[in-house]
Image (cartoon, rainbow, N blue to C red):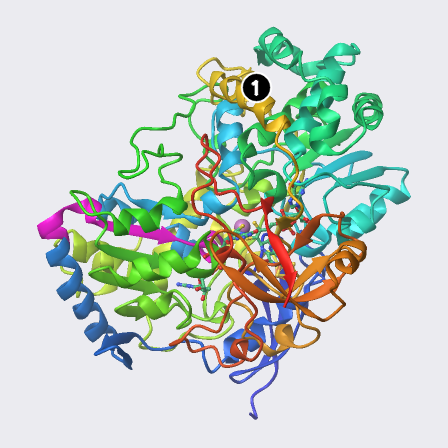
């Protein structure tokens, strides 16, 4: 430890905020991690998870060596041995049963890693399977579908221009804790505070008085799954009270009259009971939205993981459009990413648009959406005999046993596979089912460039960070592993030198760096002049390059066949027919919703000391009046049950909960045999997804319903 301390700049890969971090190291040790003040985008912001990168790097349970299962026990293996084992087990299955016999699941961390997001498509293409599943159908697929139908591409999603906004309506999101989603906005708290200080107003719609709601001007405690009624009522009010102001968008819209007609019956007075918000309030909100100088409506996961997730996602943008705030400064605007954005490629202003249902899942007939099938169909595809049965699974940075509804069913289905490969950094609830586990690198050994999140950022920027530490010599980068697997499946020589699988370009760049340089040069800020972006320029700029505030992009951004915004896509109007029936469904005695915690990240960060310390986090929040009625006191145990299972959970009383609604976080349940998560096992929590049915989906997007299910509660 006699080397000099060094300072590194590293973009955090742990959530969508993409903060720039300053990491001090000495030799092979991390000395400190703080927010990088010089980062042009995050300007010094950091959360406790960013600091936990040190714990993640040092975690003795993090895998550094491939594992092969021999007689039910995992043993360490060399990379060549492990890949040989994959070839030995996987290739004969593909040969005998065809491409669809292999399924692939790609999980959340892949969205944050160019090594995975940039190279998984190569493996998927090599496999040629129709059985591709991902966390997208547990998350944002409804928003991608509504955006695709309206604007012509799955990733053309508008975000609030918070620095110029003065009225912001947030539904089903808690950016104070999640740090934003489909809205890359580091330091939401600071930006919201600044917005309110300049006279802006923030309204939060959530069944729980969330951290974001508590820091807002107004909180509307909506009934779970009531958003579709609320949003319809607001759209109805804009039409009925003559508040529609289209502004510059007027000439770029299709379907205004069709929409008006379709929405005519959904008056606030009829919708109020469905959402638990008074008609007068719904009308007032619509008027406020229409009257604000610069306003934005933003809905996130709470609005997506519902039966009407796609309708919700659509109606949010309908409100932005009808109030003249879509694509306008201070409203909901479209970022222009420096690289990789489909809406900056091809002919500006029109395109092929999107379609769904190019194929269907074998068992339930669920339509394909954006190249994948609903992940809630995975278990039945493995279990159900017949041609096309899934016999092998490649699981890439995903932990579906904890993250997918009816996780226990999926866990037993995984045991029925002929072969399973996990690319993961832990031996956990899902990878324990694998025959081979191939580990990824520590984030501190990996370079970073975001493909996805600049497309949803509150401000345009280009940033890159190199590895903080050299990777272990024997361990490949994950993109190399993916290329090897692709070569293997294609019958090419996967043992070839990496250079043979991915040749350097004329500048000597390989792998992700080659992709990034090409994407920057051919992107909207690239070109042939001195000022134009290249990877070298982005690398040379300490803290990245600021590309300015969001700019209006319509009609250039549109990729619909009509070259217009489609306000009334037929598939969405058809689904409106089902809203009426949902209105008369009575509320159950107790409804279950989810929650996120600042010191947690989905299912895999509970083994890191800095995040694991402090109070128990996997608790059932319940309104004190409900608790009294049930005879439950703070800290007591309750039995929480659905038709699937009964779980014993610790209760925490919280006046923040709407009466009749209880909340339990997801990603817990680390008490399964065969996992290697020493610290997480001390306080395992329970698996929320054991309670949730895998049979409930938004039929349009295939997204799972994760919120709003009836539960029974009794004292334990
Ligand atoms: N009930 C309920 N369920 C939910 C949600 C909810 O709100 N409620 N939220 C859903 C949402 S939004 C999401 S995105 C999903 C997330 O669910 P998943 O996509 O399953 O993702 P994680 O739970 O984050 O698990 C990530 C896995 O990747 C591994 N990993 C981490 N880093 C790396 C790496 O660099 N390389 C590799 N190869 N592996 C790595 C981890 O060890 C872990 O096994 O959960 C969903 N599930
Ligand atoms: N600390 C932390 N940060 C994370 C994650 C994490 O696990 N922990 N996960 C990351 C991932 S993968 C994602 S996708 C993002 C998600 O980021 P967000 O979308 O901000 O997600 P949540 O924090 O779960 O906030 C969802 C809110 O919706 C509310 N809600 C539940 N049901 C309903 C409903 O029916 N209607 C309405 N209006 N609201 C409802 C919940 O009470 C909750 O407050 O967070 C990311 N960031
Ligand atoms: S907010 Fe997200 S990106 Fe920023 S430090 Fe925390 S986990 Fe990392
Ligand atoms: Mo997510």
Camera-side residue: 80 or 687?
687
Image position, residue 378 (x, y; %): 34, 48
Q: Quadrant of the C terminus?
A: bottom right
- Residue 84 is at least partly visible in this image: yes
- Residue drawn at 75 percent across, 10 percent down: 240
Residue 262 part of the magenta-drawn span: no
Which secondary structure, mark 1?
Answer: loop
On whether ligand 2 comes within 8 Å of the CB at mark 1, the answer is no
Image position, residue 452 (x, y; %): 50, 46
Camera-side residue: 220 or 111?
220
Camera-side residue: 428 or 470?
428
Q: Image quadrant of residue 682?
A: bottom right
Q: Residues within 10 Å of mark 1 (few under 14, many from 20)?
A: some
Camera-side residue: 222 or 511?
222
Left or right of 367 on screen, residue 501: left
- Residue drawn at 20 percent across, 49 percent down: 101
- For residue 214, above or below residue 435: above
Q: Residue furthest bottom?
A: 2
| Residue labelled with disc 1 | 555
- The chief SS type of the magenta part is helix
Image position, residue 115 (x, y; %): 40, 57
- For residue 407, above or below residue 288: below
Left or right of 410 on screen, residue 287: right
- For residue 528, above or below residue 709: above
Q: Image quadrant of residue 44?
A: bottom right
Image position, residue 186 (x, y; %): 68, 53
- Residue 324 is at least partly visible in this image: no
**Residue range of the region highlighted in magenta in the rendering:** 94-113
């Amino acid at each position: 430890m006699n080397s000099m301390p060094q300072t590194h700049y590293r973009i955090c890969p742990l959530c969508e905020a993409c903060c720039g971090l300053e990491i001090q190291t000495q030799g092979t040790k991390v000395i400190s991690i703080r927010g990088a003040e010089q980062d042009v985008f995050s300007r010094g912001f950091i959360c406790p998870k960013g600091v936990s990168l040190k714990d993640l790097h040092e975690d003795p349970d993090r895998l550094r060596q491939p594992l092969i299962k021999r007689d039910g026990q995992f043993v360490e293996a060399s990379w060549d041995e492990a890949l040989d084992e994959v070839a030995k087990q996987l290739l004969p299955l593909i040969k005998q049963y065809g491409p669809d016999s292999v399924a692939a699941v790609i999980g959340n961390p892949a969205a944050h890693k160019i090594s995975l997001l940039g190279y998984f498509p190569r493996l998927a293409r090599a496999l040629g399977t129709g059985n591709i599943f991902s966390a997208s159908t547990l998350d944002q697929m409804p928003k991608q579908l509504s955006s695709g139908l309206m604007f012509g591409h799955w990733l053309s999603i508008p975000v609030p221009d918070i620095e110029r906004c003065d009225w912001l309506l947030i539904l089903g999101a808690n950016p104070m804790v999640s740090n934003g989603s489909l809205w890359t906005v580091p330091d939401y708290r600071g930006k919201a505070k600044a917005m309110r200080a300049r006279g802006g107003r923030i309204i939060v719609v959530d069944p729980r008085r969330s951290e974001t709601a508590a820091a807002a001007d107004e909180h509307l405690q909506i009934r779970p799954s009531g958003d579709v009624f609320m949003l319809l009522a607001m759209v109805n009010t804009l039409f009925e009270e003559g508040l529609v102001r289209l502004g510059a968008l007027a000439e770029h819209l299709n379907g205004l009259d069709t929409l008006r007609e379709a929405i005519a019956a959904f008056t606030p007075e009829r919708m109020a009971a469905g959402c638990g918000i008074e008609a007068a309030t719904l009308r007032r909100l619509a008027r406020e939205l229409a009257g604000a100088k610069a306003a934005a409506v933003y809905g996130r996961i709470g609005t997506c993981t519902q039966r009407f997730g796609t309708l919700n996602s659509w109606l949010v943008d309908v409100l932005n459009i009808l109030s003249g705030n879509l694509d306008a400064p201070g409203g909901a605007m479209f970022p222009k990413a420096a690289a990789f954005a489909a809406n900056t490629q091809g002919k500006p202003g029109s395109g092929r648009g999107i379609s769904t249902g190019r194929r269907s899942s074998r068992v339930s007939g669920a339509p394909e959406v954006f190249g994948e099938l609903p992940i809630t169909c995975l278990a039945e595809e493995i279990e159900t005999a017949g041609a096309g049965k899934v016999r092998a699974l490649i699981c890439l940075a995903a932990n579906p046993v904890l993250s997918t509804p009816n996780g226990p069913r999926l866990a037993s289905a995984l045991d029925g596979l002929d072969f399973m490969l996990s690319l993961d950094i832990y031996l956990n609830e899902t990878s324990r089912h694998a025959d081979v586990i191939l580990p990824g690198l520590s984030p501190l050994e990996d370079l970073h460039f975001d493909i996805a999140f600049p497309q949803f950022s509150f401000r345009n920027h280009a940033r890159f960070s190199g590895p903080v530490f050299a990777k272990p010599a024997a361990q490949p980068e994950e993109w190399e592993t993916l290329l090897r697997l692709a070569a293997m499946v294609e019958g090419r020589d996967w043992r070839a030198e990496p250079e043979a699988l991915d040749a350097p370009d004329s500048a000597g760049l390989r792998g992700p760096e080659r992709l990034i340089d090409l994407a920057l040069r051919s992107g909207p800020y690239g070109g042939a002049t001195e000022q134009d972006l290249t990877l070298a320029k982005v690398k040379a700029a300490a803290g990245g390059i600021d590309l300015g505030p969001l700019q209006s992009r319509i009609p250039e951004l549109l990729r619909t066949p009509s070259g217009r915004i489609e306000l009334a896509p037929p598939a969405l109007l058809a689904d409106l027919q089902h809203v009426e029936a949902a209105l008369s469904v009575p509320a159950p005695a107790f409804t279950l919703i989810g929650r996120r915690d600042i010191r947690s990240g989905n299912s895999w960060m509970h083994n890191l000391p800095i995040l694991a310390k402090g109070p128990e986090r996997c608790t059932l929040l319940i309104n004190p009046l409900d608790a009294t009625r049930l005879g439950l006191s703070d800290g007591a145990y309750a039995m929480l049950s659905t038709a699937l299972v009964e779980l014993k959970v610790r209760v925490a009383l919280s006046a923040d909960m709407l009466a009749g609604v209880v909340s339990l976080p997801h990603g817990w349940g680390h008490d399964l045999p065969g996992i290697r998560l020493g610290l997480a096992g001390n306080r395992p929590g329970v698996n929320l997804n054991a309670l949730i049915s895998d049979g409930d989906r938004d039929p349009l997007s295939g997204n799972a319903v994760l919120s709003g299910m009836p539960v029974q509660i009794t004292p334990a």
